[in-house]
Amino acid sequence: MAQTSTTTRLRSKKLSAVAEKKPEEVALAPKSHRAEIMELLFCVGGIYLSFITWAILQERISTTPYGADGKVFDGSLVINTIQSLFAAAVGFLYVKYKQKPNERDEALHDPKVWKQITIVALSQSISSPFSYASLKYVNYITLLLAKSCKLLPLMAIHLLFYRRTYPLYKYAVVGTITAGVILFTYCKAPSSGKASAASTASAPSFIGLGLLGINLLLDGVTNSTQDHIFHTNKKITGPHMMFGLNTMSTILTALYLISPFTNQLSTSIAFIQAHPKVLNDILLFALCGGLGQVFIFHTLERYGAIILVTVTVTRKMMSMLLSVVWFNHKLTAGQWLGVFSVFGGIGFEAYLKYREKKRTAKGGKKAV
């Protein structure tokens, strides 16, 4: 009887404690483990669906003919402008969604922040045409592998400008990835018959690698400046960066397109009028890029960089394999070795980061 009455009292205490909780405290209760898993799976599915579709469309738009005339769309700045416009619109909605009710968002009201974002937008806008130009000399899978080497430009920028040193394993990882890209580029099977639109047989591959190198270096400037903005302006979040960066990119590329320095806008309009199907692909490409960025920023905010790197690396592997099947690319044994070197190096670096993070977390708990 005593045990029963004690249990009853405990239950009544728990019920009264729940009843006394404020509504906002109940709303902010942590999600269940199952809900966390379902949310993560939703984010992973969103990244995969958005960016695998995005990658297929990018290769199709940039490398395949759209009509009987055999011409390939050559309007990289037009593609970038449309994509950044879509991403800016999605980013604006994302900022509003994340904003608390009756709260005035002042994160992007600082002129200094907009100056820094303009630098990022400028480097990003200049960078992209180099990656599209490289497709005249190397195939899309080479581009995909090179773009997976995010560590290389970041290390180069920090070494050259900030005199920062790195652990030995990072240099080993960069060496493995670089060797993988070189292996993939130069171990290709001898071409027979007509050269494809994606690559010109007579053009030396090192020109394509050089263009990709410039693209990666500018990506390094973009990423390091973004990091600097996040560290020096704590109010700036992923949604703010997405909206601000894409807004400035749209303005910069649109101004260049209407300038007398290029005729890309008129030639692109003429191409779209002759081949209307390309416009559908460009719009879907832009929509996938905008939605994909939301999933990336949400995953980064909720689950951290390690999970995001794992998801994006596996996504790039799937994009590459799908490209091989979809566009009928033939890879040699040396090229497959290059592929495994690149993704093996990236995976090894992610694993070491994970171990280091766990060790740091354990050390923090012991200190407490």
Image (tube, rainbow, N blue to C red):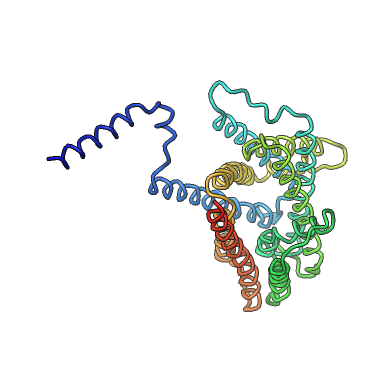
For the point 41% across and 48% down, the residue is 38
- Camera-side residue: 46 or 12? 12
- Camera-side residue: 151 or 283? 151
For the point 50% across and 51% down, the residue is 44
- Give the mark count: 0
Q: Quadrant of the N terminus?
A: top left
| Residue 122 place in picture, x, y as percent | 79, 42
* Rendered position, 85 above or below 125: above
**Extreme residue toward the top, this view:** 102
Instruction: Tell me the quarter of the picture where residue 250 sits.
Output: top right
| Residue 352 place in picture, x, y as percent | 60, 65
Left or right position of 311 against 252: left
Instruction: Tell me the quarter of the picture where residue 150 sits.
Output: bottom right
| Residue 71 place in picture, x, y as percent | 71, 54
* Rendered position, 200 above or below 252: below
**Extreme residue toward the left, this view:** 1
| Residue 179 place in picture, x, y as percent | 72, 72
